[in-house]
Image: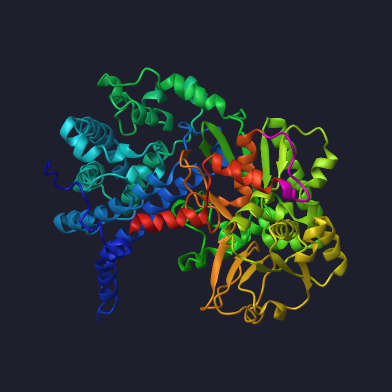
């Protein structure tokens, strides 16, 4: 094994505790405040502020680049950012800590940094000259040097391991490379200060612009119009665009410059396709781009889930949604965005992935869960869903699948409202409940003879009850409506009708250990279940795990096939690669090429058909997926 010093971070295994390395700066500030004659260590405060600002610049740029509803037609590399890349870049901010420590060493080494004024115009001029004449060519040669065999294999290959450049990819490199980068940054700042022209504003300004331009170059989103270069051709050699730098990531022997392509032109490493590629991407910004083959139409659940999207915090969206205490301070901001979306917004693109070369997208209706229970909001919600379906139809989408409350029976009859209103739709509208029912039913052991079913007269409850009674399973259907119960009972074969039993109280299930929950139940209601009961469920939100002596199933879900590409965000509370069964049902509908709408009541005869199709296409039930993971760990 080749020895490669400074190829790994010394705090690599510290996790979140690496931020304690900022502790000495904070401690020094606090200590200075506690002196009898305070001499506040402002330089420590500046380092802490700059570290925070640098992280925010990268994060805000990353947020913008993942706002697909704004940037989808400006993306340069159209691949998605998958979980592997997200995990690889998780500690992208290590370089900010390193540069903070380097800055502290520089402060103690150069007395000229101790008493800098707020502003000095000459310093900006000096820094600009030093950057163009020293930092730019130095970075260019450093960068080319790191592309040589030994250095690339042991160092720079880490940066190029990200298939799709992102703003945080700018920081995804080894300590040796960032030490070299700190030299490039230090020359204009330190040089100006040694000349006597340094200032606080110069340090802030230079570093912020430096990070802004590096983040922009790695954003994978073109924001510079080709018209600017056509009007002022010289700017092509003075400004590195995201397209220009992306070519370096796809064709690594070209476009080595920092911010000024003139040095690539001088070094004969300028990619000949740079300007044409830039023009193509710039012109594509006004077009629709690639049409998705499949769309999953979701809605926002609550304030917490509204922050669980790639354009909020990418790393958070790559994990199952849950209560994260460090996000609580951002709730007021998320609440304001909720009000803005309620007042003025339309369905927007959230994420995408590829499956067998076909583009699958997730669109979101800008409404939260509680909106669906406001009577005066229903018409507006249906209008938003209808407009999304019509847009998908115009674009040429093959299948659009409705999620959760978007297919609520009382809202639009499980999608029948739209199909009846627009009988000539080419896009197939799917509620996916057939596969949802199949997932729940296939989790029930074959030897079960009796189940207790709440939400018994809902679309799913009806289908589950009818399916189970055909298997000669006794179904205790909790409902106060005898009329609705009898209507369902009459749908069952005559010789199976006696297996459907109406009950009106939870006490009726005190001896039944298989509960199928389609309606939220309290601790008191759960208390009637005998010890050892397993709660299957299709209720949103999931019921709370009150009972320690019982087990609880997950919401109906399936793992996408292994050949899915570019998937980098979790679907609400689901594990990585796992989607709600209604999402999976739409995927199966598309893969099978079925030409019918799946709306309204569930066709019980098709439950097994849809399940077999899902298995054929490589989707996996979550239960077997988790069992496989456990066996693998063992």
Name which quarter of the figure residue 267 lies in.
top left
Q: How many callouts does the rendering have?
A: 0
Q: Main secondary structure of the magenta part?
A: loop
Residue 144 point in image, percent of width and height = 22, 30
On-image quarter of the C terminus: bottom left
Residue 92 visible somewhere in the drawing: yes
Residue lying at the far right in this picture: please name it.
Answer: 483
Q: Is residue 246 left or right of residue 256?
A: right
Residue 239 visible somewhere in the drawing: no
The residue lying toward the viewer, choosing from 497 and 613, is 497
User: Magenta residues, as a range?
Assistant: 594-605
Name which residue lies at 51% across and 42% down.
Answer: 618
Q: Is residue 165 left or right of residue 254?
A: right
Name which quarter of the figure residue 237 lies in.
top left
The residue lying toward the viewer, choosing from 513 and 323, is 513
Q: Is residue 235 left or right of residue 536?
A: left
Q: Is residue 572 left or right of residue 540?
A: left
Residue lying at the far front in this picture: please name it.
Answer: 495
The residue lying toward the viewer, choosing from 360 and 107, is 360
Residue 429 point in image, percent of width and height = 72, 41
Taking 40 as reference, is 71 above or below it? Answer: above
Name which residue lies at 16% across and 57% down.
Answer: 111
Name which quarter of the figure residue 22 lies in.
bottom left
Name which residue lies at 32% across and 42% down.
Answer: 124
On-image quarter of the N terminus: top left
Q: Is residue 346 magenta?
A: no
In this figure, which colouring scheme has been used for the structure?
Answer: rainbow
């Amino acid at each position: 094994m080749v020895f490669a010093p400074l190829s790994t971070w010394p705090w690599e295994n510290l996790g979140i505790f690496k931020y304690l390395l900022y502790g000495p700066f904070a401690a020094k500030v606090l200590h200075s405040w506690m002196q009898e004659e305070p001499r506040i260590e402002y330089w420590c405060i500046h380092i802490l502020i700059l570290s925070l600002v640098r992280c925010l610049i990268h994060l805000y740029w990353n947020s913008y680049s993942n706002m697909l509803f704004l940037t989808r037609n400006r993306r340069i590399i159209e691949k998605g950012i998958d979980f592997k890349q997200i995990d690889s870049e998780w500690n992208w901010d290590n370089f900010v800590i390193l540069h903070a420590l380097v800055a502290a060493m520089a402060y103690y080494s150069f007395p000229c940094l101790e008493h800098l004024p707020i502003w000095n115009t000459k310093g900006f001029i000096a820094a600009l000259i030093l950057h163009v004449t020293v930092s730019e060519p130095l970075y260019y040669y450093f960068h080319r040097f790191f592309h040589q065999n030994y250095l690339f294999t042991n160092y720079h290959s880490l940066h190029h391991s990200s298939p799709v450049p992102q703003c945080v990819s700018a920081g995804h490199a080894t300590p040796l490379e960032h030490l070299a980068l700190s030299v490039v940054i230090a020359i204009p700042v330190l040089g100006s200060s040694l000349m006597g022209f340094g200032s606080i504003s110069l340090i802030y300004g230079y570093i912020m612009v430096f990070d802004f331009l590096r983040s922009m170059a790695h954003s994978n989103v073109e924001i510079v119009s080709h018209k600017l270069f056509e009007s002022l051709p010289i700017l092509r050699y003075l400004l590195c665009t995201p397209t220009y730098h992306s070519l370096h990531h796809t064709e690594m022997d070209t476009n080595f410059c920092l911010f000024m392509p003139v040095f690539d032109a001088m070094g004969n490493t300028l990619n000949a396709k740079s300007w044409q590629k830039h023009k193509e991407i710039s012109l594509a910004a006004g077009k629709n781009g690639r049409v998705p083959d499949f769309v999953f139409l979701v809605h926002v659940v609550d304030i917490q889930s509204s922050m669980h999207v790639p354009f909020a915090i990418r790393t958070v969206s790559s994990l199952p949604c849950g209560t994260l205490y460090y996000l609580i301070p951002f709730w007021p901001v998320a609440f304001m965005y909720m009000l803005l979306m309620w007042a003025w917004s339309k369905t927007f693109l959230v994420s995408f992935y590829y499956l067998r070369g076909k583009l699958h997208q997730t669109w979101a209706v800008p409404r939260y869960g509680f909106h669906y229970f406001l009577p005066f909001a229903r018409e507006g919600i249906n209008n938003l869903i209808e407009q999304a379906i019509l847009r998908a139809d115009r674009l040429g989408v093959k299948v659009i699948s409705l999620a959760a409350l978007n297919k609520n029976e009382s809202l639009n009859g499980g999608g029948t409202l739209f199909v009846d209103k627009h009988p000539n739709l080419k896009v197939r509208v799917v509620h996916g409940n057939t596969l949802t029912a199949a997932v729940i039913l296939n989790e029930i052991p074959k030897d079960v003879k009796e189940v207790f079913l709440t939400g018994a007269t809902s679309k799913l409850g009806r289908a589950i009850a009818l399916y189970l009674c055909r298997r000669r399973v006794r179904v205790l259907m909790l409902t106060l409506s005898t009329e609705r119960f009898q209507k369902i009972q009459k749908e069952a074969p005559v010789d199976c009708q006696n297996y459907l039993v109406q009950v009106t109280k939870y006490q009726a299930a005190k001896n039944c250990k298989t509960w199928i929950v389609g309606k939220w139940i309290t601790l008191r209601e759960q208390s009637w279940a005998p010890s050892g009961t397993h709660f299957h469920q299709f209720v949103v939100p999931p019921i709370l795990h009150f009972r320690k002596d019982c087990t609880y199933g997950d919401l109906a879900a399936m793992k996408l096939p292994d050949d899915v590409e570019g998937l980098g965000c979790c679907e609400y509370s689901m594990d990585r690669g796992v989607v709600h069964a209604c999402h999976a049902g739409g995927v199966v509908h598309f893969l099978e090429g079925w030409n019918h709408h799946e709306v309204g009541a569930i066709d019980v005869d098709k439950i097994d058909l849809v399940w077999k199709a899902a298995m054929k296409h490589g989707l996996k039930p979550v239960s077997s997926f988790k069992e496989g993971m456990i066996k693998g760990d063992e």
